[in-house]
Image (cartoon, coloured by chain):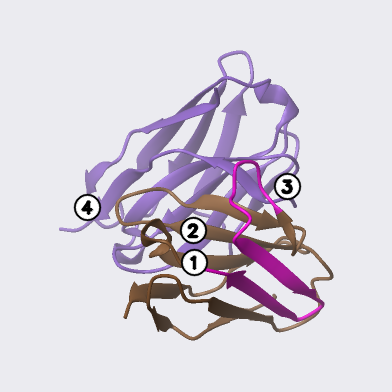
């Protein structure tokens, strides 16, 4: 079973600054990595799949990179609507697994 | 427009059973795999179960294997999760989710239904 570990647990960032979130897999998942955003009281929303491909309608300030076991989600210039919890998820092997999440909060 | 609407959540005693349903619209239901994902209060996401488009293959997290049964009725565009022998740790919001295959990301989520297991 693949374990996904996200860091940091909480990231304090000022609006307009860059945010860098990390996700590590316990074994290789190739490029089969997705990122989701979840706001309070809402369902998650798909941001990135295939480690680096933005989902439909996702702004260009969101970018993903990495392969194998190390992945990064970068938000180039944080907007007010970007403060949320972000989860990575591997879909290379069943059971599919989510990371524990990174909360991006206003500094 | 893709829509997923869950129902069936509520309060149930430990050891009891509950059946969740998810009505789907806006896409060719039988073409896509579906899944249930849950989120305990204040916690992260946990993949619970998945089912292929035709319903022939099902998958379960170890935490629910042998207690939960996923099924679908493609003639009615509905997904179901039969939950038996419920435990306090099953308390969560349960989301219905659409994927392309059983090993692809979730592209659409329902709003979730709350299941509370408590005496």
- Residue indicated by mark 2: A37
- Residue indicated by mark 4: B13
- Position of residue A17 relative to residue B89, above or below, is below
Give me the C-alpha separation between circle 3 and circle 1: 22 Å
Give me the C-alpha separation between circle 3 and circle 2: 21 Å
Density class for disc 3 (Cα within 10 Å; few <14, some 14-19, many ≥20) is: many
Density class for disc 2 (Cα within 10 Å; few <14, some 14-19, many ≥20) is: many
At x 73%, y 50%, the residue is B104
Query: What kind of element bears circle 2?
Result: strand
Specify start and end residues of the magenta stretch as a single range. Answer: A54-77
Query: What kind of element bears circle 1?
Result: strand
Give me the C-alpha separation between circle 4 and circle 1: 33 Å
Chain letter of mark 1 equals A
Closer to us: B61 or B40? B40
Asked if the magenta segment contains residue B103, the reply would be no
Specify which label sits upstream in the sequence, 2 or 1. 2
């Amino acid at each position: 079973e693949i374990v996904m570990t996200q860091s940091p647990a909480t990231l304090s960032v000022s609006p307009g600054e860059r945010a860098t979130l990390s996700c590590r897999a316990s074994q290789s998942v190739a490029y089969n990595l997705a990122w989701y955003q979840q706001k309070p009281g809402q369902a998650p929303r798909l941001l990135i799949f295939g480690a680096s491909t933005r989902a439909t309608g996702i702004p260009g300030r969101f970018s993903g990179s990495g392969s194998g076991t190390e992945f990064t989600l970068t938000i180039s210039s944080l907007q007010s609507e970007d403060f949320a919890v972000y989860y990575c998820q591997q879909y290379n092997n069943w059971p599919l697994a989510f990371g524990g999440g990174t909360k991006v909060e206003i500094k | 427009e893709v829509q997923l609407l869950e129902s069936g959540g509520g309060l149930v005693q430990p050891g009891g059973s509950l059946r969740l349903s998810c009505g789907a619209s806006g896409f060719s239901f039988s073409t896509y795999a579906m899944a249930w994902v849950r989120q305990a209060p204040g916690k992260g996401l946990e993949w619970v179960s998945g089912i292929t488009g035709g319903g022939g293959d099902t998958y379960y997290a170890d935490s629910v294997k042998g207690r939960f049964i996923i099924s679908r009725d493609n003639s009615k565009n509905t997904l179901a999760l039969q939950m038996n022998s419920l435990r306090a740790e099953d308390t969560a919001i349960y989301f219905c989710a659409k994927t392309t295959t059983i090993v692809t990301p979730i592209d659409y989520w329902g709003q979730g239904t709350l299941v509370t297991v408590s005496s």
